Image (cartoon, rainbow, N blue to C red):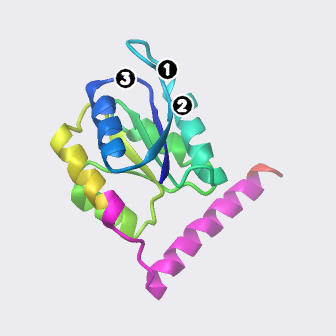
Amino acid sequence: MKIAVSTDERTPLVESLFCELKERGHDVTYFGPEKDESMDWPVVTERAAQLVASGEAAEGIVMCWTGTGASIAANKIKGIRAALCLDGATTKGARTWNHANVLALSLQSTDDTTLKEILDVWFTTPYSSDKWNLQQIDRIRKLEQASSSESST
């Protein structure tokens, strides 16, 4: 699967993520710094989220110090449902009920063990297809459409 990854800092967690994704057979498109430099998180997050929104990447993983900023920035892109996940339980809910297509991670709070747990759940949890849940996802899409049509007027 093609996955768009972004980060504003190149930390050991980023290296661990790359190793995990490679071991799992994913193709990564990366947006972010190469070494000890930093980049603006809204900029790199937008690039990754746009790749997902356009269909060029199946999913995305965006990171910043807390993960909050990256999740906020990603969610500004139409069609993105980014979720900040700190453990397997929130990850399962994000996939099942929210149909999250972008995973937001905290560079500060995520250790390698938790990263593996989150990725295991992320890649094995299907979206819920029950009628009630699909209605909620449709309501989110309608909110997004209403918001984008208001901004264009």
Amino acid type shown at disc 1 = Met
Task: Please provide the residue range marked out in magenta.
Answer: 122-150
Q: CA distance from mark 3 to mark 2?
A: 12 Å
The dot on residue 44 is 2
- Residue 62 coordinates in the image, percent (x, y): 44, 40
Residue 115 placement, left or right of 149: left
First of labels 2, 1 by sequence position: 1
Q: 10 Å neighbourhood of mark 1: few (<14), some, or many (≥20)?
A: some
Please tell me whether the stretch drawn in magenta is mainly helix, strand or loop.
helix
Q: Pointer 3: what residue?
A: 10
The dot on residue 116 is none
Amino acid type shown at disc 3 = Arg
Give the residue drawn at x 23%, y 38%.
110
**Foreground pick, 57 / 128:** 57
- Residue 5 coordinates in the image, percent (x, y): 46, 39
Give the residue drawn at x 23%, y 61%.
89
